[in-house]
Amino acid sequence: MKILYHIGRYFWMLGKVFSKPERHKMYGRQLIHEIDALGINSIGIVVIISLFIGGILTIQLAYNLMNPLYPKTLIGLGTRDTLILEFSSTIIGLILAGKIGSNISSEIGSMKVTEQIDSLEIMGVNSASYLILPKIVAVVFIMPFLVILSIFFGLLGGLVVGPLTGVVTVPDYIDGIRYFFIPYYVTFTLVKSIFFGFLIASVPAYHGFFVQGGALEVGKASTKAVVNTNILILLFDLILTRLLLT
Amino acid sequence: MIQVTGLSKSFEEKTVLQNITTSFEPGKTNLIIGRSGSGKTVLLKCILGLFEPDSGTIVYDNRDLTAMKQKERKLLRREIGMVFQGGALFDSLTVEENVRFPLDMFTNFSGKEKLKRVSFCLDHVNITNANHMFPSEISGGMKKRVAIARAIALNPKYLFCDEPNSGLDPETSTLIDNLIHDLTKEFNMTTIINTHDMNSVIEIGDSVLFIHKGEKCWEGTKKEILSSGNQALDDFIFANKLYAQMKKGQI
C-alpha cells in the first residue's frame, strides 16, 4: 500500500511542477543554470566512461569472435550496435542517476530541512515548479546530447583500444561500424534517453522534496533516490525495448 | 490586523492547539511565547497557511485565509514577510540576490530600481559591503539581518519572525529585536514574533500571547507580564533566576 501512496504523491508533485510558472524570465534563468550544472558538468564523466566501455566492448567481442570464419568487421559492428542500443543510453542513464540524481535529491532535501522551501512558499512562489521544472527540462534536453556524445566516444574507445591490443585493425573496425547501419536504432536510443532523463530528474526531486528531519535524512533520501531511479531506468528500459524494438 | 478565532489543530490523535482566539494589531510587535513544544510554531504556521487548521478562522484585514482559494492565498502571501529561525537564505544566491529575489519574482522594476530597493533594505538592517557574499560566508547575526532585509523587500503589511534571535549573543539579539521593533513602527506592519526569549519580551513586547499546552493561557503587555498572577506564566518566566530576583526586588 505504501508504494501506492508514493506513486500518488509523486504524480501530485508532478501536477504542481507542471503548473503555470509565476515568471517565465526567472525560470529561463534557472533553466540555463541547470543545463550548465547538471548537463555540461556531466560531459567529463560521460566521455571517460564511454571511452572505457567502447574499449572493453571491443576486446570482449573480439574474444567471443575468435573463430576465423567470422569476419573481423563484426567486432566494429557489434561494438556500434551494443553502444547505440543499450550501453550509451542505459549505462550512461544509470551513471547519471548517481551523479545528477544524488545532486538533485540532496540539493532539494537540504533546502527543505533548512526551511528554504517554506520560505519560497510563503513568498507565494510555487516551490515545486520553481525548483524542479527547470531541472527536469534541463536533464530531458541534455540527455540526448550526452547519449550521442557517449556513442561517439564509445566508438572512439574501441578504435583506440582495438588496434592497440591487436584484436582488430583500424580498417576492419571502421568497416564494421559503417556496415549495415540502421538509423532507427539511434531514434530508439534517443527516445529512451528522454524517458531516462525525466526519471533521473523527477524521482530524486521527489525524494528531496518530501524529506523530513535533518542532514541524516537528506543523506538517506539521496541514497533511496539513486536506488529507485536505477530500478525505474531498468524497468523502463525493458518496457521501451519491448514496445519499440520487437 | 490579523484575527484568529477558535483555532484548533491536531496531528493524528495529538491535539497541538485548542480553541485559540486572539488578534494581532498593526504597528505593534506581537509576541507569541511559550515552552518548547507548547504549539507556538504550529500556531504561526497555521496563521501563515502552511498548516490547515482543523477548525477556526484566520482573518487578515477582513480576508479569511481559511476560506481563500490557492490563487487568493498566493496574492495574500505577497503581503507577508517571513524571517525564519535559521534565516532560510538561498545558499546558491549572494546576499544581494537573496534580497532581490522577491523583487525579481513579483515586480516589474527595472534593474536600477531593484538595486535601489535592495540597497535601501540592506541599509535599514545595517548591512554594508556584503552584497556579493554568499550566506555561508557571513555570520549568524548577519544572516538574520539579511533575512529581515529580504522579508521587507516587497514592503509587506505583515511580518512574521520565528525565533529571530535564537543562537545569537545577547548584544546581537537585542540589536535584532530593536531592528524588528523599529521596522514595525516605521512601516506600520502587523508583526508577529514567535519566541521563548524573555529579553525580547521585556524589550519589544507591545503585546504578548502566552501559549501553554496548546491553549491560550494569558494575553497582555510587557508591563503586565511580571505581575500577571498566572501560575503557568510565572513558572515560565521565573524559571530564569534573573527574573525571579527581579520579581523579589533584589535587582
Image: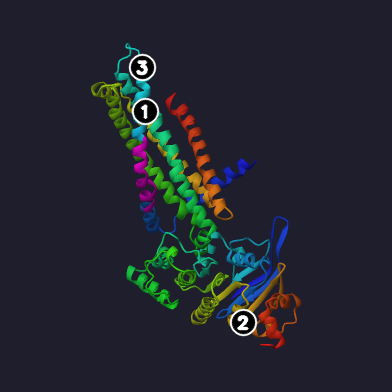
Question: Which of the 4 image quarters holds residue A146?
Answer: top left
Does the CB distance between marks 3 and 1 fall below 8 Å? no
Question: Above or below — where is A242 with respect to B210?
Answer: above
Quadrant for the C terminus of chain B in the image: bottom right
Q: Which residue is mark 1?
A: A56
Question: Which of the 4 image quarters holds residue B33?
Answer: bottom right
Looking at the image, which residue is at 54% across and 54% down?
A215
* Amino acid carrying mark 1 in the image: Ile
How dense is the environment of label 2, judged by Cα within 10 Å: few (below 14), some, or many (20 and up)?
some
Question: Above or below — where is A69 with respect to A110?
Answer: above
How dense is the environment of label 1, judged by Cα within 10 Å: few (below 14), some, or many (20 and up)?
some
Looking at the image, which residue is at 68% across and 67% down?
B38
Label 3 vs label 1: CA separation? 14 Å
Label 3 vs label 2: CA separation? 86 Å
Q: Earlier in the sequence, mark 3 or mark 1?
A: 1
Residue B113 percent across, percent down from the top left:
35, 72
For the record, the magenta segment spans A33-49
- Numbered tag placed on residue A65 in the rendering: 3
Q: Nearer the viewer, mark 2 or mark 1?
A: 1
Name the subunit of mark 2.
B
- Numbered tag placed on residue B202 in the rendering: 2
